[in-house]
Image (cartoon, coloured by chain):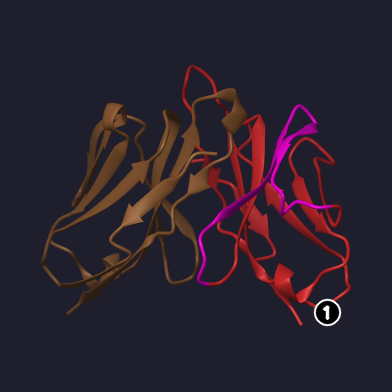
């Protein structure tokens, strides 16, 4: 069964450094998402992406964040200058949203630790 | 935006017991999903259930869309069922976009 993959599974970085989190969505999906979960809290929406552009973003997704689909398979989240409060689990998700079917498929997550 | 409330926040069971987790939402939905977050932090998709009833082994779920709630039933619970259970919804109207809004979760502990 096709699945969403994410790399790395765990990333440790120093405050102020740039990080890129990578995701490979399911191949025939057209809508892509990033969510994050701070330890002990609920999962929060960051951004959705469709047709090579951001379709929606939350108030969390400020100028420090960017997303890109650099080729036909990868979907990336970049944090330009990490802060301690960016430490969280980041989930990528995708869906195909056809025929009224809206199920989102989640990757296993990348745990980001900012020191 | 759409609001999601889960209850109870915490639930402690003995192995073999049955349980019901509830998710209330504030508006019409295109999508409702139940997830189990395992000890490694992964979100395991249990059900895609914007309406109706589904069963998968010891787990079943029912969504009554007209009354804006969903129930997740766990029967004959096992210690491996422990973890956090999340309900997540996508609102139907354009103003909601396609984002999933998650509830706060139910922390389930099953004791041997």
Q: Chain of mark 1?
A: A
- Residue bearing mark 1: A14
* Location of residue B28 by image quarter: top left
Report how many numbered discs are placed on residues in the image.
1
Q: Is residue A69 above or below residue B9?
A: above
> Residue B1: x percent and y percent?
55, 39
**Residue B37 falls inside the magenta stretch:** no
Taking the magenta stretch, the answer to whether it contains residue A46 is yes
- Range shown magenta: A40-62
The quadrant the C terminus of chain B occupies is: bottom left
Judge by depth and name the residue closer to the eye, B89 or B26: B26
B5 relative position to B8: left or right: right
Residue neighbourhood size for the residue with mark 1, other residues' Cα within 10 Å, grouped as few (<14), some (14–19), many (≥20): some
Q: Residue at x 51, y 60 (%)?
A: A42
- Which chain is painted in red? A
* Relative vertical location of residue A106 with respect to residue B108 in this rendering, above or below: above
Residue A17 in the image, given as x and y percentages of width and height: 88, 72
Q: A1 left or right of B69?
A: right
User: In the structure shown, which secondary structural element does the residue marked by tag 1 occupy?
Assistant: loop
Q: Residue at x 57, y 28 (%)?
A: A96
Chain with colour brown in the figure? B
Is A94 placed above or below B21 here?
above
Quarter residue A65 falls in: bottom right
Q: Dividing the picture into quarters, in which one does residue A81 lie?
A: bottom right
């Amino acid at each position: 069964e096709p699945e969403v993959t994410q790399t790395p599974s765990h990333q440790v970085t120093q405050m102020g450094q740039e990080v890129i989190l990578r995701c490979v969505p399911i191949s025939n999906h057209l809508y892509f998402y990033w969510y994050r979960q701070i330890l002990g809290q609920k999962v929060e929406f960051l951004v959705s992406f469709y047709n090579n552009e951001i379709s929606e973003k939350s108030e969390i997704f400020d100028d420090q964040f960017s997303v890109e689909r650099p080729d036909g398979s990868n979907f990336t989240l970049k944090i330009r200058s990490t802060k301690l409060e960016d430490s969280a689990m980041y989930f990528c998700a995708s869906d195909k949203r056809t025929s009224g079917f809206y199920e989102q498929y989640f990757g296993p997550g990348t745990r980001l630790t900012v020191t | 935006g759409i609001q999601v409330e889960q209850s109870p926040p915490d639930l402690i069971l003995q192995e073999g017991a049955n349980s019901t987790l509830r998710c209330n939402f504030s508006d019409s939905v295109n999508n409702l999903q139940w997830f189990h977050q395992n000890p490694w932090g992964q979100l395991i998709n249990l059900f895609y259930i914007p309406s109706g009833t589904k069963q998968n082994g010891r787990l079943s779920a029912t969504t009554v869309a007209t009354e804006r709630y969903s129930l997740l039933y766990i029967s004959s619970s096992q210690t491996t069922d422990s973890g956090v259970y999340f309900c997540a919804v996508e609102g139907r109207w354009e103003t909601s976009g396609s984002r999933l809004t998650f509830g706060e979760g139910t922390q389930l502990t099953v004791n041997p």
